[in-house]
Amino acid sequence: MQRTTDGWGSGLLGVIIFSGSLPATRVAVGGFTPLFLTSARAVIAAVLGAALLWALRQRRPASSDLASLAIVALGVVIGFPLLTALALQQITSAHSIVFVGLLPLATALFGVLRGGERPKPAFWLFSIIGGLSVAGFAFSQSGGGSLVGDLLMVAAILLCGLGYAEGATLSRRLGGWQVISWALVLSLPVMALAALATRPETWSGISLPVWAGLAYVSVFSMLIGFVFWYRGLALGGIAGVGQLQLLQPFFGLALAGLLLHEPVAWPMIAVTGLVVLCVAGAKRFA
């Protein structure tokens, strides 16, 4: 029981950190190309991850783990960051929340396919209700979509769900922060070359908010968030803890109300309550 509780608490911290990823990406693509942003954030996070691995003298993964690490890198180091950066050139970060509501279902699906988990039928009911609630609320609060942007977000969600599930399975053997660190190190040569090839011609016109966006997605979204997230999935279960992602859009709205003094309407509170109940139900039947 304590192991499961720790997993859900760790997963919640990961979700809170990830809640700022899409807005930060939206700001960063205002000054960087999607290819440079994706590669630069991976390079920065890889350097930090490699330093941690070296300082704490972590053993190298077995050769049998390399394929799984490559899947993690494809999903969360390359696929999701690149596809969302491309999508956010055409859609707003608010519109992208529609698709975040589908991420728990994608994670649970790949948890069944790759992690061998078998949630009860009631779990899928709560998951679908929660996902539709988030998607419906986000869609009603956002606009400015495009077909290309929407398709890019769907692809990003599928790759992210695969990377989450694969990384969580591998975390049971290597540890949560070690998995994302090794995945970053594995992708470093390719991403470093990509960063050099796509770097801006001049750095003088890049604003401070753009740099801040890059810093956030590099340090928090690409590394620190995964330390908590993979640990949570490994301890609490991929399918169950994955449902915490349903809360991610509402953390962003809550922060907007508290820090930016933006209005928080009663529909947000009502839908948040419904989603919390769905997460509780999914936790019970996972």
Image (cartoon, rainbow, N blue to C red):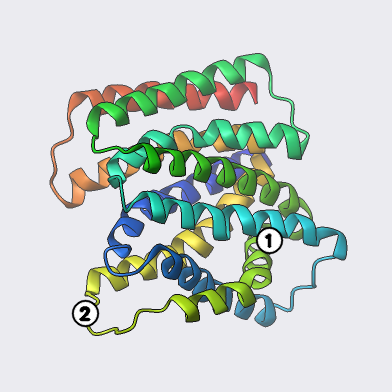
Residue at x-position 30% and y-position 45%: 91
Horizontal side of residue 169 vs 191, given as left or right: right
Label 1: which secondary element: helix
Kindly indicate the quadrant of the structure image that contains residue 71: bottom right
Q: Does residue 6 show up?
A: no
Tell me the crowding category of disc 1: few under 14, some 14 to 19, or many 20 or more residues within 10 angstroms, Cα based: many
Kindly indicate the quadrant of the structure image that contains residue 74: bottom right
213 is higher (above) or lower (below) than 139? below
Horizontal side of residue 177 vs 245, given as left or right: right
The percent position of residue 56, horizontal first and vertical second, equals: 69, 77
Q: Residue furthest front?
A: 148
Please name whichever residue, 129 or 76, is drawn nearer the observer in this view of the structure: 76
8 is higher (above) or lower (below) than 88? above
Amino acid carrying mark 2 in the image: Gly
Please name whichever residue, 175 or 98, is drawn nearer the observer in this view of the structure: 98
- Contact (CB < 8 A) between labels 2 and 1? no
**Which residue is labeled 2 in the image?**
205
Mark 2 vs mark 1: in front: 2
The percent position of residue 282, horizontal first and vertical second, equals: 56, 24
Tell me the crowding category of disc 2: few under 14, some 14 to 19, or many 20 or more residues within 10 angstroms, Cα based: few
**Which residue is labeled 1 in the image?**
179
The percent position of residue 265, horizontal first and vertical second, equals: 17, 29
Horizontal side of residue 105 vs 176, given as left or right: left
Label 2 or label 1, whichever comes before in sequence order: 1
The percent position of residue 69, horizontal first and vertical second, equals: 72, 59
Q: Does residue 223 show up?
A: yes
Amino acid carrying mark 1 in the image: Val
Separation of disc 2 and disc 1 at Cα? 36 Å
Q: In which quarter of the image is the N terminus?
A: top right
Residue at x-position 61% and y-position 14%: 122
Residue at x-position 53% and y-position 34%: 104
Q: How many marks?
A: 2
